[in-house]
Image (cartoon, rainbow, N blue to C red):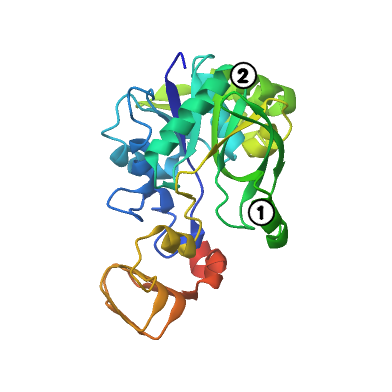
Amino acid sequence: MSSKIHPVILCGGSGTRLWPRSRAARPKPFLPLLGKRTLFEQTLDRTTNPAIFGPATIVAGSAHRDLIAGQSGAAEGVRRIEEPAARNTAPAIALAALLADEDDILLVCPSDHHIADPQAFAVAAESAAALAEENWLVAFGIEAAAPEAGYGYIKRGDPIAGGYAVDRFVEKPDLETARGFVESGEYSWNGGIFCLKAATFLEELAAQRPAMADALRQSVERGEERDGIFHPDEASFLAIDGESIDYAVMENTDRAAVVPVAMGWSDIGNWQALHAASERDADGNSVKGRAQLVDCSNVHVQTDGARVSAIGLEDVVIVVDGDEVLVTTASGAQKVGKLKGAAGQ
């Protein structure tokens, strides 16, 4: 690898499925859900090895300007881009690519994921960067540890140096199909982590989504730097139809590659996922805050004040946050975002 990798950290989404802990004013990336550091801070931590990584670019909206400033203060050389509105991942990544040098290798990282093995992440990043220098657009293929209907999948194709060409992407299959994917050993989870050369990504975006590419270029050309933050031109940016990098580019390009990696990844997409990533006792219980559990198994408790006492429960999540209390079965955790409280945040 001839140059450093430049992290692009995406701060988007509201984390409604982790209500009531995650709120609009302080969503999931900026919470210390696993350990003392927030998920955003942990993302910065694992991309700050100066032997591998260059300074990060953070792409976010204005709502969390102060949180980002407070939690990224110790990181050196950070560049910040503030989107006028949320337009999904393809435009966000393009903003970073347009402001980078054309040969820069960009490592796109969501800000709200947990990775238990940062060393495996770094090794995969270097393998992916070597492929990106050869003009591949590289996805991290997360080890599919179990059939999950809530994740996208990547099928590996022909082997190439350091990884595989992508045979196809599959969006959130049903559980039976996902089970077949895992049993085949040919599929990985698509965790939304990508490595690409700035110029290559912009070329592909222009080929696949020319109107989006033109509007983004205009938004950068007409944008300005204020108070250490780059602000794209609002009118040009708002003209964009939002779309993910998966739909806009990766599923259409013939340059897609995948680097398989087992690194203890979780998107912490709901309370059950957080429970699975947390330290648990011999009965499978995980507790944060004041709680007493008697004859309970696979129970997750988080409380920021009131003591929680539970007896004889199985597969239950209990969360106390200020004046809000959530109680759900583990299987119901996927539906938390549908609650009126979560929707209103």
Q: Would you identify the image quadrant in which residue 79 lies?
A: top left
Figure check: 59 above or below 115: above
Q: Which mark is residue 135?
A: 2
**Residue positioned 53% across, 63% down in the render:** 343
Amino acid marked by disc 2: Asn
Query: Could you say which is closer to the camera, residue 172 or residue 96?
Result: 172
Seen from this angle, which residue lies furthest bottom? 312
- Position in image of residue 172 (x %, y %): 67, 53
Secondary structure found at label 2:
loop
Q: Is there any visible trace of residue 102 in the rendered image?
A: yes
Q: Earlier in the sequence, mark 2 or mark 1?
A: 2
- Position in image of residue 66 (x %, y %): 33, 42
Figure check: 19 above or below 190: below
Figure check: 258 above or below 55: below
Amino acid marked by disc 1: Glu
Q: Which mark is residue 183?
A: 1
